[in-house]
Image: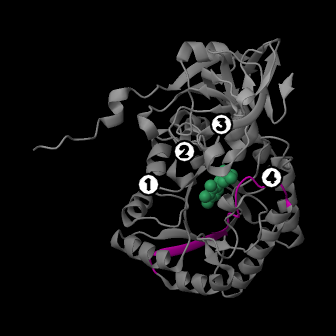
Amino acid sequence: MTLPGAPFVARRGDALELDGHDLAELGRRHGTPLFVYSARAMRSALAAYVEALQGREHLVCYAMKANSSLAVLQLFARAGCGFDIVSGGELERVLAAGGTASKVVFSGVGKTRAEMARALRAGVRCFNVESEDELETLNEVALALALRAPVSLRVNPDVDARTHPYISTGLKDNKFGIAHARALAAYRRAATLPGLRVVGIDCHIGSQITQVGPYVEALDRLLDLVEAVELEGIPLHHVDVGGGLGITYADEEPPPAGTLVRALLQRLDERGHGARELLFEPGRSLVGNAGVLVTEVLVLKPGAEHGGRDYCIVDAAMNDLVRPAMYEAWMAIEPCRRRADATRRWDIVGPVCESGDWLGRERELALRRGDLLAVLSAGAYGMSMSSNYNSRPRAAEVMVDGERAELIREREALPELYARERLLDT
Ligand SMILES: *Cc1c(COP(=O)(O)O)cnc(C)c1O
């Protein structure tokens, strides 16, 4: 039986499996907290975009901030995928994982000169420029290196992605992108700067989007600009519609990637832009449902009988998986071995000294100390947002692929936590 929203997670008898691998066994072998990813789930999520784009000029750039572990990047690089990066550190990771700079688009509102120079020398495909100031800086950096920077302007289309305010990025009052009303002037300026070469236009309207409508609206706003910009003799090769497609955590029903792609291709055709290259920057939708976080029950503190709550304290915490604490995100939690015992409504919390340190509230589960639980759909914005808060070492990661289960990240060792720190001399 597969579980809703996580097609590669299934129950076989009482055991919980990720693509045929027993999660309890992996948790015991490698220790917890442990992230486990399915390579097949990631490849199939990518294929959903790529297959719908067949016959069109296109590039899918994995927004690697969702999960930037080297083996994950290696998997996508081998599948021919490009990357959407937001820092110089991410560029180094792509290169270390065997990715090619010519398939990298560089997004982000605050790139430093050093990051720009490194990306220029590496030969990234495009800078997604987010302000008029950035155009000037990038031009200076490129001229100093006797190079020309390929640029796309990230336009803020002012459409409502209808998602959580923290992850909505396409409205006028967001910090991201160039206001739609300023974009034409910014393109005129970019076209006059000798260190720049205008190659495209982009937007990114938010994250965990569950409808096609906002994307089509955003594309329409972009195409209005493409037409206006090209009328001035500034050709735009590609249109990049960003990422943001949602996944199923609970009962959300986002459109499949193929449905989204086809709706956008149809709109391009209707407006006579069918030959234009289309770029996507999906993050969550490529990796989210491909991963789980395995954690052990450390302590059970039932308190409901005394007017309190039933607390289940596990060895994973907000430093490992911050989404519930940060966005009040609901993530499914399943026992790695189902028990026939009576259930209670447990609040699943971590050991960190913060009341906000929770993974799930009021979950009807039969639990005993030492049991392993799996937080589902933890492949995106889990490990990549993890921290060492409370001096907790970062979790280990395993990738399963067919028969194989490979450790792709060792658990951090305690001395690594303070390896770069210095005691005072006096
Ligand atoms: C975060 C981000 C993405 C990916 O968003 P998802 O919701 O993970 O698909 C794409 N493009 C840009 C510029 C981003 O900042």
Mark 2 CB lies closer than 8 A to ligand 1: no
The secondary structure that most of the magenta stretch takes on is loop
For the question of whether residue 68 can be seen, the reply is no
Q: Quadrant of residue 335?
A: top right
The type of residue carrying mark 3 is: Leu
Residue 120 covered by magenta stretch:
no
Q: Callout 3: 10 Å neighbours few (<14), some, many (20+)? A: many
Q: Which residue is mark 2?
A: 385
Lower sequence index among marks 4 and 1: 4
Mark 1: secondary structure: helix
The magenta span reads 194-212
Mark 4: secondary structure: loop
The type of residue carrying mark 4 is: Gly
Lower sequence index among marks 2 and 4: 4
Number of marks drawn: 4
Task: Tell me where residue 123 appears, x and y as whole percent.
Answer: 47, 58
Residue sitting at 53 percent across and 63 percent down?
108
Lower sequence index among marks 1 and 3: 1
Confirm or deny contact between disc 3 and disc 2 (CB under 8 A).
no
Q: Which residue is mark 4?
A: 55
Q: Quadrant of residue 145?
A: bottom left
Lower sequence index among marks 1 and 2: 1
Mark 2: secondary structure: helix
58, above or below 291, in the image: below
**Rendered image: mark on residue 359:** 3
Which mark lies nearer to you, 3 or 2? 3
Residue sitting at 59 percent across and 50 percent down?
83
Which mark lies nearer to you, 3 or 4? 3
The type of residue carrying mark 2 is: Met
Mark 3: secondary structure: strand
The CA distance from mark 1 to mark 3 is 31 Å
